Structures are given as structure tokens and as C-alpha cells.
Amino acid sequence: TQLLEQSPQFLSIQEGENLTVYCNSSSVFSSLQWYRQEPGEGPVLLVTVVTGGEVKKLKRLTFQFGDARKDSSLHITAAQPGDTGLYLCAGAWGGGYQKVTFGIGTKLQVIP
Amino acid sequence: DADVTQTPRNRITKTGKRIMLECSQTKGHDRMYWYRQDPGLGLRLIYYSFDVKDINKGEISDGYSVSRQAQAKFSLSLESAIPNQTALYFCATSDAGSTDTQYFGPGTRLTVL
């Protein structure tokens, strides 16, 4: 089983600050997804990155896939209270039928 | 309407009872999954099914069973519930593409007393 380590596990910041969440592994993934989960709900897909070195932007969120496809980062600019939630990374791996491994998540709280 | 639905959303039961959690999807995906989520442990895969005739154990299948009644329906059963099965349970689907992006249902909060 491939392992994905997310850091930090908890993050509490003031509105307007920037932050970065990291997702690291010693294994190579064919693709990596970032999800956001709110209390009482299921994870919702934010983005999928496939190519090593790929950068995707979603408004104030910037996602990067490492060149070697072993790590990824999520950067939020000028965080807002609506960004509060649990952020999960998930990597797809394996040939043929692919498996998906989830990170433990980063719980973000943005204080107004 | 939601693409992936789960019933019930909340359930409280007693040790030893049989429980079934149901999942339906309208996304037309072949692949369906059951996960449980626990604080500090993240999402862990219980069972997955890549088509109606295919059932596979995940990393924590002991104490659980599944049934894939149709492409759109995948149910999870706890034959004899125990307190450490108290958790959030999520059903997910994915298309058989290269990225295997997962689409999750809203979850079932199960409490076993």
C-alpha cells in the first residue's frame, strides 16, 4: 500500500493570511486529487493533477504536483472563513485496476 | 438531485445487531467503494467493486460484507455490529479512467452502543 503523509494536520490562521498544505510520499502516483470536506458531508473534489510539475489554479487556491509525481502542495492565498474545512489529498496508483490512497487530512480553521 | 446518495444518514444501534447501509448513484460509473472515516485515521477502504460481478476486499474488510445489486447500487452490511465500528461511512464512485477520481456520497454516521 502506498502511503501519503499530509502536513500540517491542524492549521488555525487569521483571515487574509496565506497557507500551504503538503502531501508527501516516497511512492510515485499516476495522479493526485485534492478534496475538501465540511463537517457532516462527504469529501468534494477540488482538483486532479496528472502530469509531473503541473500547476493548477482554482481562484485563490493553487495546486502543484511534484516533478517526480511523489508529492503535491495546496497553497491558499488570502484565506477566508469559507475556506474552513478538512483538506484531503488522494493518490491513484497501480497498473490495470488503480487503487487510491488517502492522506489523513489537514483541518483548516480560518478565523474572521 | 445528488449524484451519490446514502441511506440512512444517521443510525444508532446496539451491539450484535445487523445493519445495512445503502448507496445509490446516478453518475453511471462502474466502480463503487465503501470507506470508513475515523478521527486521526483518515479514510480507509472497506470494500470496492469495479462492476456488478466484481467484489474486492479493502484494507479493513473484517466484520463487513457488501452486495452489488446493480451498477447503481452498492450496499454495506455489518453482520453483528460492535462499538469499534462506530464511524462515518462513505460510499464513493469513480469512472474507469486514468485518474480514478472519487465522487463521494454525503455519508452515514453510525453509532454502535
Image: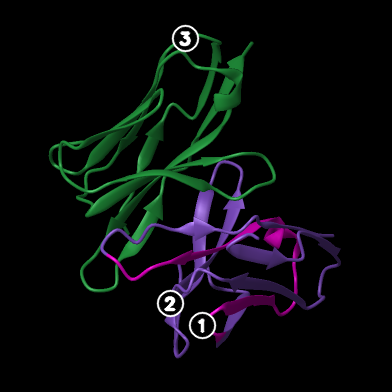
Chain colours: A green, B purple
Element carrying mark 3: loop
Q: Which mark is residue B30?
A: 2
Q: Nearer the viewer, residue A98 or B29?
A: B29
- Mark pair 2, 3: CA separation: 42 Å
Q: Which mark is residue B71?
A: 1
Residue at image x 65%, y 55%?
Answer: B106
Whether residue A98 sits left or right of residue A84 in the image: it is left
> What crowding class fits label 1: few (fewer than 14 Cα within 10 Å), some (14-19), or many (20 or more)?
some
Query: Label 2 is placed on what type of residue?
Result: Asp
Q: Is residue B74 magenta?
A: yes
Q: Is residue A66 above or below residue B4?
A: above
Q: Is residue A3 above or below residue A55?
A: below
Element carrying mark 1: loop
Query: Label 1 is placed on what type of residue?
Result: Gln
Query: Quick check: marks 2 and 1 in contact, CB under 8 Å?
Result: yes
Q: Using the rendered image, report if marks 3 and 1 lie on a common chain.
A: no
Magenta segment, which residues? B70-97
Residue B74: give x, y in percent of width and height. Answer: 58, 77
- Nearer mark to the viewer, of 3 and 1: 1
Location of the C terminus of chain B by quadrant is bottom right
* N-terminal label among 2 and 1: 2
- Mark pair 3, 1: CA separation: 45 Å
Q: Which mark is residue A17?
A: 3
Query: Quick check: marks 3 and 1 in contact, CB under 8 Å?
Result: no
Residue at image x 38%, y 68%?
Answer: B95
Q: Is residue B92 magenta?
A: yes
Residue A103: give x, y in percent of width and height. Answer: 42, 44
> What crowding class fits label 2: few (fewer than 14 Cα within 10 Å), some (14-19), or many (20 or more)?
some
Residue A76: give x, y in percent of width and height. Answer: 41, 21
> What crowding class fits label 3: few (fewer than 14 Cα within 10 Å), some (14-19), or many (20 or more)?
few
